[in-house]
Structure formats: C-alpha cells, structure tokens
Image (cartoon, helix red, strand yellow):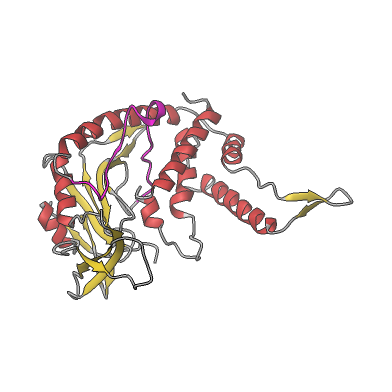
Amino acid sequence: MAHLLEQYGEMASFASLRQPAWHGLGTVFEDEKTTSEMLDAANLSNWDVRQEPITLPGRYHGGEFFANVRTNPFDQETDVLGVVGARYKVFQNEELFSFGDNILDGGGTWETAGSIKNGTVVFGSMSLNRDITVNGETTENYLLMSSSHDGSHPIQASVTPVRVVCSNTLGFAIGKGGKSAKQSFRIRHTATTEGKVAVARETLGLAHKYLDAFEIEMKKMIEVSVSNSQFENIITMAYPKPDSVVQSENDGEVLKGGAMAANTRWEQKIDTLKNIWGSETTPEKNGWTALNAMTERLDWHRQSRNGSYEGALISASGFDPVTNVEKNRLNKITREILGVK
C-alpha cells in the first residue's frame, strides 16, 4: 500500500481541497474549510490521544513506560499507537493544526490533511499563497504541519514546494551552511507549544526568506544546461560503484562474497536514474531537472527492505529527516559538478 493512508473499509483519513490525490482516497471538497472543519473532513477529530501506564514483569527493570492510545475515528474502539517514556508529552491533532493556523495568523488555506501508518503520523498542509514562476514553470508553496503519536516524529512546521501526496519534494536547506534561510521548525514531544508561535514565525520568517532564496537558487540551476555525460558524472559522484571485486589468477574480475548482490543493486539504481533522466518528465536538460531526477528516485522509485513501498509517502512529503539529509547531499553534489555557486 504505497500511500500508507489509514483506511477503514472504503473510508480513509484524508481530505483535499478541490484536487483528488493520485490514490483516489478520502474526501475532496470545493470550498475552503476552517481548521476544525478540516480535521473533521480528514477524520482527525476527537482522537483523545492519551497515555496508559505499562506494568513490566517483576524480573524486568527499565523505568516508566506508557502506551499512547486513541479512540479510533471509525469504529470508536481503542488503538495502541506506540510505547513512550515518562517524559513524552501527548499532543492532540487539534493542537497541531491550531499551531499551524496561528503561525500564519489565519492567512493560509488548508489544502490537504491526513493520517498515515495506522494513525501514528498525522499531517496537514496550508497554501502560503506565494508562488514562484521561473521560465513558465510555477511552483506553489505550502506550510506543512506534521507530528507523530508514537515518538517517531517531532511536531514540525516546514515550508515546502509540494502539495503532500501529489509530487516530488524539493525542500532544501538553502543558504550558507543551510543556516541563513531555514525552512523547518521543530518541537520535541517533551516540550510544549505554548509561547512557540512567535519563535516559529521568526524561524520560518513567514516563509518568505526561504522562498526568496529558493527562487534565486532555482533560477541559477535552470540557467545551466546539462549534457548526458555531466548527468552521468553527477550519478557517479553521488553513487560510486561498490568496491566489490578481486583479481583472479588470469587478471579477470571476480565478485566476492555478497558483492554480487550489492553490484546488482548499484546497477539498478544507476539504470533507474538514467531512465528518469531520459523520460518525458525531464524534457529540458538543465541543472534543475537534473536535481529533480536525483530526488525523484528517492521519493518514488525506492522499495523498502521488505519489498513494499513502506515509507514512500513519509519520504516524499519531507517527514523523514534521513531522506532530507540525503537530498541536501545530492543538491550539493549536483551544484559542485555543474559549478553553480
């Protein structure tokens, strides 16, 4: 199940303004909704997330642990969402969405909202009404609010040029050292949102500082033409061929141990990137489309270790910090190869 949305029969925890998502699930509505109406439409209201103490068997020691549970929005039964420590603070979905609404001071429009991974992760995105147009291509921008109920994800507000579940995420750390124009603000589940709205607004700069820098960087990348050989150089630097061969007696190359599998995975990765680069999704060959091709593979062309697309939505929506670090690494490599300062 690539979308990972929480479902109950034909119902799903997802809502979208005017545009249906690629998975075709959830509620599509035509008129703008208030924060409470958005929560209702996405089946995110009244979960009553709460903690119940866990009693360890007498022979075990390890401190206090609690089960985070909720009232299931579909059947009203009780679900266990995760196990956390004593310092963990529960945040309701209503608090998360109210925090996002307050950051924009009511100036945004709720676009999408939903619950994934059996209710453990929730998200909502608001349009910033701030678009970037370069060479006729318009990039819309959003404030993405996300959190978890199992301790896996902090409360996070991110500026991202992606309408969640619909396209490739390109939220890079822009600026020297990634510090001059931040696009995300996080609160740990051991803290509180009280008094954080002003800090979040300052950190995000109401998004404009980041988006201004993002627009400049995008224009620089679009202005640089990229040949097939340059794109192959980007791939090679990003993903060097595994050191997986030994010399045989007749000076031939022989794969050792599990290196054959590693070599096969590397070849598949390279083939996927070349196919994306040569596809109709990248008709123009410039620095921007080269970077898009690299990140597109991360978002939509990877499988998890168990062979499913587990985590695809989290990765593509900017929830996963590991994926975000990798995308910034690819951004740096692409710019170095192309000489874009």
How far across and how far down the image is residue 162, in percent?
32, 45
Query: Does the magenta segment cover residue 191?
Result: yes
How far across and how far down the image is residue 166, in percent?
33, 52
Q: Is residue 284 above or below residue 12?
A: above
> Would you say 335 lies left or right of 33 here?
right
How far across and how far down the image is residue 42, in percent?
19, 61
The tally of labels here is 0
> Would you say 185 lies left or right of 76 here?
right
Query: Does the magenta segment cover residue 174?
Result: yes
Going 34% across and 72% down the picture, which residue do you hit?
Answer: 58
Question: Magenta region's main secondary structure?
Answer: loop
Going 49% across and 39% down the picture, which residue do you hit?
Answer: 330
Going 27% across and 47% down the picture, which residue do you hit?
Answer: 188
Can residue 49 be seen in this snapshot?
Answer: yes
Can residue 284 be seen in this snapshot?
Answer: no
Magenta residue span: 167-192
Nearest to the observer: residue 229 or residue 281: 229
User: Which residue is at the far front?
Assistant: 59
Nearest to the observer: residue 86 or residue 104: 86
> Would you say 277 lies left or right of 119 here?
right
How far across and how far down the image is residue 20, in percent?
26, 58
User: Which residue is at the far right?
Assistant: 250
Q: Is residue 43 above or below residue 30?
A: below
Q: Is residue 257 above or below residue 145?
A: below
Going 21% across and 37% down the picture, which residue do you hit?
Answer: 200
Quadrant showing the N terminus: bottom left
